[in-house]
Structures are given as C-alpha cells and as structure tokens.
Image (cartoon, helix red, strand yellow):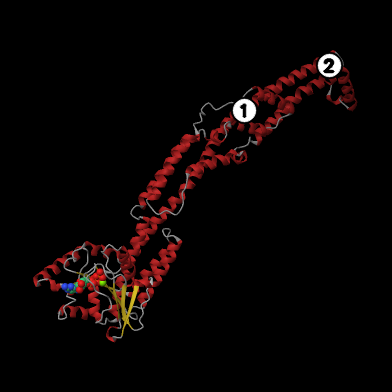
Amino acid sequence: MSSQKIHQKIQAIQAWTQENVILASTQKKQFAQWCNDLTTTLERASQTPLKIGFIGGTGVGKSTIINRLAEAEISVSHSERPYTDKVVLYYYQNEIPQLKYDSSHLIHCKHERENISHLILFDFPDYDSHIAEHQTMVQDISKQLDLIVWVASPEKYADQAMIQMMSHLLQSSKNYCFILNKTDQLQIDEISQIIGHWHILLRQANILDVPIFAISALNDYDKTFHNFQEWLFRKRNEHELKEIKRANIENQIKHKAQEIQQQVDCQQIAHVINDLNQQKKHLNTFKKMRQKDILERISSDAQTSIYQYLSRQSHFVWPVGIAFGLIGSLRQAPINPQTVPSSHDNDALFLTTIDNAIAQIQKKSTFPDSKPSLLTTYRQFIDRYKDPNQVVPFLGKIGWAQSTYFWVKQWLVICIPVFLCLIYLSGIHQLESIESIGISTLIGGCFRIIIKLFQSEGLIAMMSLLFIELFLSMQMASAWHKKLGRKSQEFYHTLSNHVSEQLMLTLYETIQPLIDWAEQAELDCENLKTII
Ligand SMILES: Nc1nc2c(ncn2[C@@H]2O[C@H](COP(=O)(O)OP(=O)(O)OP(=O)(O)O)[C@@H](O)[C@H]2O)c(=O)[nH]1
Ligand SMILES: [Mg+2]
C-alpha cells in the first residue's frame, strides 16, 4: 500500500471515529490523538532511529545476545530465572527515545558507535514467567517498536506462549525476525530439524517469509551470529523504513478496528436490532390488552366523569336544568358493561418482563448509558393523566349545532305553553281580527290576566301550565340524559383509543432511542468494515 493510500486510510478512520455512535467522547479524543500519532510516525519514518526489541521467554538468552551486540554487559545475563526485570535501552549518544512509560522501569545505556546510530535496541523482561508485571511491560512498551526479534531456545521454540504474545502485540509479522539461540547445545541435523519445524509452526500462525537465524550467543566464532548482526545493523533506505512503519500502522489499524468491532459486537448488532423490534411488537399485545380499560387505570370511574363533563358542557334553560339535576341524582350514569378492569399488577408484570428482556439485549452490546424502564414510563403516564386537565384535550365537545338546537328546543317547549296560557287568560284569542290588537288591547289583556289569576279559571290555567311545564321539562331532561349516556359511551371508546394510542407512543419513545442507536451502530460497523 502506498504512503498516500495509508494517509487516506488514517484520515478516513479519523473521520469515522468522530462521527460514529459506538465510541464514548473520551474514546473519540483518544482515537483522534492516536490517528495524529500515526500520521507523525509515517511522516518521520526516515528521520527517527529504528526501534528494535528482543522479546522471548525467560532464559532464552535475550540479555546475552544484546550484550554481545553491544560489546559490553549492558544487561545482566544470569542463570537465575527470571532475571531481567526492567527494559534496557541501548542507543546512540543523545538519541534518547521518547517513551510514554514509567521511567523507573527503564534502564538507559548510551553508546558512541556511529555505525549503529540509526538503531535503538531494547532488551525486555520475559513474558512467560510467574511475574505478570513483566508481561504487561512487554505488551505496553513494545507498542513503540518498529522491528521485533523473537528469541527462542531449543526447549522453547514451539511454546504456544510466543504465538499468544504475538496476538497481543501491534507490529506486523512482516517486521518480525526469529532467533533460535543456544544452538551450541544441538547437533547440526537437529538444528535444521528444529528450523524446519519452526517454519511450519509459524506458517500455521500465518507468519510467512520471515528471517530465522540459528545462533549461539556464547560462541564467538558462530558465523550465523555475524549474519544476524549484519541483518540487524544494516542501514535501511528511506523506502524500506517507510515500508516497516506502514506495515505496522496497517496492523495497528486492524487491531483497533477489531477492538471497536468487539466493543459493539458488530456480529451481534443485527440480532440486537431484531430482538429490540421483537420487544416493540410485544408492546402491541399490551396495547390490545389495555385499550378497553385504559381509562379505568387512570380514573376508577371514567365513564361517570365523562358524563359529568358532557353535562357541564350542556346549556339548560333553568326548568330543564333543575329537572336534569333531579334525574341525574335519581339515576346513575350508564356504565359500560364491557369494562372489567384488570389489576395494575398484571400491567407491571407484563412491562417488567419486557424491561428485563431489553436489559438482557443491552448486555449483548455496548449501549450508551441508558436504562429505559417501560414500567416507570407507564406509571408516570398514569399519574400524569390522573390530572383531569391532561385528559380534557382528548375529550370532544358536544357539537355546537346539537347544543344550539337543544337550547332553542328548550325555549320553544317552555315558552309555547306559557304563551298559549297568556293568550287564553288575556282573552285576546276572542278578538275578531289581528288588526284590532293595539296597545290599549294589550294593556286590557294584562289587566284581565291579573284579575283572572285571582279567579278559579285563572288558577286552574296556571296549575295546568305548571304541570305541563313540569312534564315537558322532565321529558326533555330525561331525553337529554339518555343522549348524554349514549354520547359518554361513545366518548369513552374514542377516549380509550386516544389515551391508549398516546400511552403506546410514550412507551415506544422509551425503546426507540435504543433501536435508533443500534441501527446507527450497525451502519457504523459497516462503514468501518469498508474503511479497513
Ligand atoms: N549454552 C548456551 N547458553 C546460553 C546462550 N545464551 C545464553 N545462555 C545462557 O542462558 C542463561 C540465560 O541467559 P539470559 O541472557 O539471562 O536470558 P534472558 O533471555 O535474558 O532471560 P530473562 O532475563 O530471565 O528473560 C544464562 O546462563 C546464559 O549464560 C547460548 O547461546 N548457549
Ligand atoms: Mg534477560
């Protein structure tokens, strides 16, 4: 891959890390810094010394090899196991390597040998002894290395520990070199046998075309050691140096991408979305269960409340109003026979089951820190709608035409008998023609009414009027009562639908952010795959 391509890749990753929903904001900052570091490493590939580390199990001879290369005892080689407990750095004069690590774990050894001024050698502690801190040190400090020299002895070359360690490190296997030390303990045919076997083992671990040197660090006349030294000390040209850095960067990107994919579990995310949608579907069952008696959840006597609300909306002429009040107190508002409210516990149980299922789904992936609870949302909803002001917007009103018609009807029904009675008492109906009705006739009529009121004829007429009015008012009030009863039942159903619809929306809103997040995370996973 060319420099330009890898630059583009870093930029694409940088853009991705800032836009995705998977990483937390602190992680995003770290990734931005990491991308900047990669770019700097690539740009300064030929200007910085090559960092080469010796890594291997305890006692394989790492310190002995580095001492021989340094031509001095810079790192104590010992028969005691494990021995080296700090990272020994061997570098030219003032080329002090900038390591982000606790300096108490580092030993600095400077040299004056100009022919190897382009290198920094690292002798590491082991990774396979009982001291776990050594392994951590190897994993952490090795991140800075450009090349790794894996050292093994005839007893340890086939250890799985080495392959395992490789999987933790970030360098590309293109930048590995292998040393079989202590060959002075082997016969020539044994050496070639072991090297052959080692090649096979490495190939199985997908490590191909790497140099393997079979050396003896203690044998001054060992030719292979010289070959190894030559390979190690060789001054690489700019192209080779860039290749080394590029391969490592590519490998680091791959590692980071795997880390992110594991963090959100990209393999699982489609299932997670599916599971969440499944839970959303379960909520529909809840809707069907609750639609009929949702109002009973909110108010124990919803239908009466609706009836009273509608009564308050009605405009009565006072005799009808009084009659309506009388009927209302004698008769109960009709109750919806279908309404058999189930217990609150059933709702709680149902919603808790879904809540638990969602919590389980959330465990499958790194969801943002949110713990939605349908049960809490449901309880809050019920509490909120206990306030009648919240419910009123859902209630319709009696149509104005119906209301005005009822009002006019009341006036007509009340006024016509009064009018007829007055005409009768005033004697105006006995006049021959309408034209003869004048002011004086009307005043005369009024006097006649007053006089007749004190006579038996007037009293009978008034009593009849009273009875007629009473009868008509009761008739109208009773008809209106029945009408409101029917209307309140109708409203009860519409209101149930409205409120349960609203409840479902509120419950969906609780889950929806999780689904949205998971869908976006799936998209981010796809994008990350295409970048890499
Ligand atoms: N026979 C033989 N012994 C060697 C050779 N190289 C190192 N040794 C011996 O192996 C023992 C361990 O050598 P070290 O260099 O301390 O090994 P190390 O890998 O640094 O070990 P740790 O620091 O514990 O990780 C010492 O006693 C060395 O003398 C070799 O080529 N041949
Ligand atoms: Mg050592």
Crowd rating for badge 1 (residues with CA inside 10 Å; few <14, some 14–19, many 20+): few
Mark 2: C-beta under 8 Å from nearest atom of ligand 1: no
**Residue 213, visible in the rendered structure:** no
Amino acid at the residue labelled 2: Gly
Amino acid at the residue labelled 1: Lys
Residue at the spot x=74%, y=19% of the render? 468
Looking at the image, which is closer to me, 288 or 124?
A: 124
**Residue 220, visible in the rendered structure:** yes
Q: x, y percentage for residue 197?
A: 14, 66
Crowd rating for badge 2 (residues with CA inside 10 Å; few <14, some 14–19, many 20+): many
Left or right: 20 with respect to 429?
A: left
Q: Is residue 358 above or below residue 3?
A: above
Q: What residue did someone put label 1 on?
A: 483
Looking at the image, which is closer to me, 151 or 526?
A: 151
Secondary structure, mark 1, is helix
Residue at the spot x=56%, y=40% of the render? 383
**Which dot marks residue 503?**
none
Left or right: 183 with respect to 331?
A: left
Q: Is residue 192 above or below residue 492?
A: below
Left or right: 335 with respect to 432?
A: left
Q: What residue did someone put label 2 on?
A: 458
